[in-house]
Image (cartoon, rainbow, N blue to C red):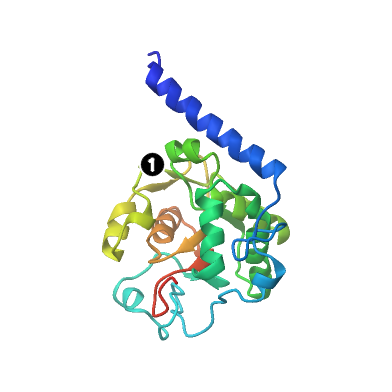
Amino acid sequence: MSTSWPDRLKTLDVLLARAGRSLVNAIYPLECAGCGSAGKTICDRCAAELPVLKPPFCSICAVPGVGSLCWRCAETPRHFDGIRAPFRHAGVVRRAVHAFKYEGIRAAAPQLGGMMAEYLSRHPIAADLVTPVPMHPSRLRERGYNQAGLLAAEIARINNLRCDADLLVRVREVDPQARTPSGAQRAQNVASSVALSAGRDVSGASILLVDDVATTGSTIDVCAAALKQAGARSVWGLVLAVAGGEFGTE
């Protein structure tokens, strides 16, 4: 069936916008999300003041500002074995993630992924392979890249791990989690939305699942459920930042 002219124009609009962002990224230097200085997504001066995730935080989902277990992990069994992150989703980290995720600044991936890789080197997690949280094909076409996939590739490269970017697939499009207010709604939003790709075997495997931000852990949990159902031995989440908890997101 032929595509209508309005649909063709919309597709052209997306491609031109994507090409424009790529061109801008190639011509102009990165700007620091904290102070605006040129050269890096986060300059050395702002990097010295990043909101490092420090105890107390939940031993399972890493939500900050709580004791050994948050109420959500205490009340509801998780499919993932744990989530870890170097930072809280606040300040310059939050602004850098927004630019990386929503403003087409894919050139931020090496630095942000490098920060996650450095954290993993200092806090090892047993993993046979690294895989990103998947993006639905329609959203991938619109954005042009999966930010989690770019981070996973950097982490795997730096830590000499195998990366399978297509291990998981989105089988149902969901509303953006950032627009879903409550934890219960987030869990319902992503339920049964992820599956193991055809032909993949994860029996007995230890898997490191990568995303940019975790709030309630619902997205990582639905991915972990698909992997555990397929026989994975362990599934740990690694994100750049965790949001929520006593500290909020500011």
- State the residue position of label 1: 171
- Residue 209 seen in render: no
- Label 1 residue SS: loop
Place of residue 211 in the rendered image (x, y in percent of width and height, measured from the top left): 51, 58
Place of residue 63 in the rendered image (x, y in percent of width and height, measured from the top left): 43, 75
Place of residue 122 in the rendered image (x, y in percent of width and height, measured from the top left): 67, 75
Residue name at image x 44 percent, y 40 percent: 139
Front residue (pair 17, 171):
17
Q: Is residue 43 above or below residue 62?
A: above
Amino acid type, residue under disc 1 in the picture: Val
Neighbour tally class for label 1: few under 14, some 14-19, many 20 plus, Cα within 10 Å: some
Residue 118 occupies quadrant: bottom right
Front residue (pair 178, 153):
178
Residue 121 occupies quadrant: bottom right
Q: Is residue 11 above or below residue 192?
A: above
Residue name at image x 46 percent, y 27 percent: 11
- Residue 69 seen in render: yes
Place of residue 28 in the rendered image (x, y in percent of width and height, measured from the top left): 70, 46
Residue name at image x 69 percent, y 65 percent: 43
Looking at the rendered image, the quarter that the C terminus falls into is bottom left
Q: Locate residue 110 relative to residue 174 in the image: left or right.
A: right
Looking at the rendered image, the quarter that the N terminus falls into is top left
Front residue (pair 93, 236):
93
Q: Is residue 244 above or below residue 162?
A: below
* Total numbered badges shown on the rendered structure: 1
